[in-house]
Structures are given as structure tokens and as C-alpha cells.
Image: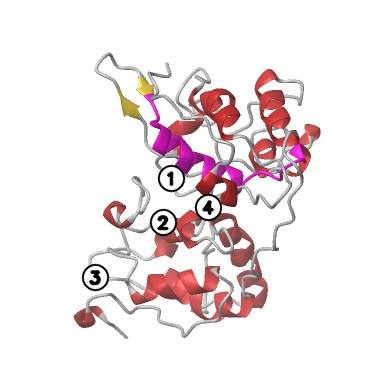
Amino acid sequence: MLGPRPSIALATVLLASASAAGETAGQEPLDFERYRETIEPIFLADRGGWGPGRAPCVTCHSEQGTPLRLQRLRETAGGDVYWSEEDSRRNFEVVSRLVTPGDPDRSRLLRKALVVPEGGAALHVGGKFFESKSDPEWQAMADWVAAADPVERPAPPRLDFDFFRDCVQKMYLDKRPGDVECIHCHETGVRGFARHIPEGRDFWNQEESRGNFAITRRYVEPGEPMMSRLLTHPLAPAAGGDYFHGGPRRWDSTDDPEWQMLAAWVRGETPECLVGQADDPGGSRE
């Protein structure tokens, strides 16, 4: 149940959140008050269990480094959970990047949990729980998005495949002391972005690299390193990483040269390859 909220002063302009929604002069931005009263409760709704596709959205989206990275819930003395106004504004900034104002059908937020025959995205790790666009929750989100004027947004940066092939993949094979290589867990299954290398070779060929790249891209949000699971899953929670990762924490800090290299690649740059270099000068390895 959503707990008490502090009073919110009326304002004619949403300052920080308006820029996240892409507001320009003369346009009606995404409405924060409507978002807080109508959209956030959807993230808290009980889906009937705790398995994939059945848990409340916040269960995964406050713990994992997905593009929909929500603030962790607060709790009252009576056990009710809620977000403060500050939390909600941070959530609003994140959510605003995942919708196309004025166009619900092109909004990632609305397509992820919608079944494919109705126009939903092909993949949502949390499963599908909107069977049609007539679902009241889906309609509530669609109405909120449709009420905002369309906004032109720049295209996200392009991820350099050659850099991925020649450098990022090296990280999948690199072993840090006391840890296991990424390929140890990620060479099979739906999260297999480092597929098994055929006998007689020690690296992937062009076709295999393309396959690894296609899967890796699911875990990268171009232009947004801290919204990219490839960078947040193995990052220590104290540095902003996900609260759970089945494997080791490869980076203790975002200052780690290797993490910085990946962040630059996610931003569309082609940096120097620094695989194997750690934040600690004594941690560098061949």
C-alpha cells in the first residue's frame, strides 16, 4: 500500500523534471502530478507472486540497473511503503526518458510489458502482464503520455561494433584475481553474450562476435552508462551498481579505468582499450 506523501506546492513549471521530459517553449510537458498519482501506483501493484512477470515492477526495477531504475522504497512505522516527493521526482526523470510524449505506441515504457501481438516489445525479462491495450493500467499510462505535446529528441549514439569485437570481448575472457571470467557464466542461455568459443580457437570470429554484440546490446543503453546493465551489474553497490549480481563485482568504483573505457564506448566514443587495468595501480595485469 502506498503510504503518506508530503504536500506538494502547486507550480506552473516543473523545473528539473521538465528538462528530462524534453519541454520546450509553448509545449505541454509530461505532467508530474498526474504521474505521481496515476503512474507510480502501477509500479507498486501486486502481480500475484514473486516470479518473473508476477512481482510488482519495483521489485526488480529498484534493484537492477535497467533503464527503468526506480528509487528504493521507504517504509512507515506501520509497514506501508512509499516514495518521498524527492524520490518521485527522480523516478519521473527516469520514466520520462522511456516515453515518447504524445505517442504511447512508440513509448518503451508501454511496450515492454505489453504482449507482442498487441504491439509490445519482443523481450521483457520481467514477463508480459498487459494482454491488450484496453487494460486499465496500460490505458492510464497511454493517456498520460498522449496528453503531452510531441517532443523531438536526438538519436542515441551508435555503439561501435569494431571496438566491441576487438576490445569489449577481451573483457569477457579476462580474469581478475579471485574472480571468474564473464564467459564462465555467460556463454549459454538467454544472457549468453559471451558464447562458447569452438575447439581449436581462443577468440570469436566475425559472425560469432556479431552474435555476442546483438545480445550485449540488450544490456546497454546508448548514451547512458549508469542505465546500462553491462556496466552496473558487475559494479559494487556502493559505487552505484546493482544490489544483486550472481557473479563477482568486477569494479569497485566508476573510477576504474576499464569501467571508464566502457562508459566512453556507451556514450558513442572509441576509447583506448584498457581491458585488464584496475583502479589500483598495482592491479594491472597482462
Task: Find disc 3 in the rendering and name its residue.
Answer: 177
Visual colour scheme: secondary structure
Q: Are marks 3 and 1 in contact (CB under 8 Å)?
A: no
Amino acid at dot 2: Thr
Task: Find disc 2 in the rendering and name its residue.
Answer: 232
Q: Are marks 2 and 3 in contact (CB under 8 Å)?
A: no
Amino acid at dot 1: Gln
11 falls in the magenta region: no
Task: Find disc 1 in the rendering and name its residue.
Answer: 64
Q: Secondary structure under badge 2?
A: helix
Please give the name of the residue rendered at 64% of the width and 62% of the height, measured from the top-left corner.
Answer: 214
Mark-to-mark CA distance, 2 and 1: 8 Å
Q: Is residue 50 above or below residue 21?
A: above
Q: Is residue 214 above or below residue 131?
A: below
Question: Magenta part of the protein: which range?
Answer: 82-104
85 falls in the magenta region: yes
Decide: few, some or many residues near mark 2? Use Cα within 10 Å; few <14, some 14-19, many ≥20. many
Left or right position of 161 against 263: right
For the C terminus, the quadrant is bottom left
**x, y (%) of residue 242?**
37, 49
Q: Are marks 4 and 2 in contact (CB under 8 Å)?
A: no
**x, y (%) of residue 159?**
62, 70
Task: Find disc 4 in the rendering and name its residue.
Answer: 191
From the viewer's perspective, is the residue at label 1 or at label 4 nearer?
1
Q: Are marks 2 and 1 in contact (CB under 8 Å)?
A: yes
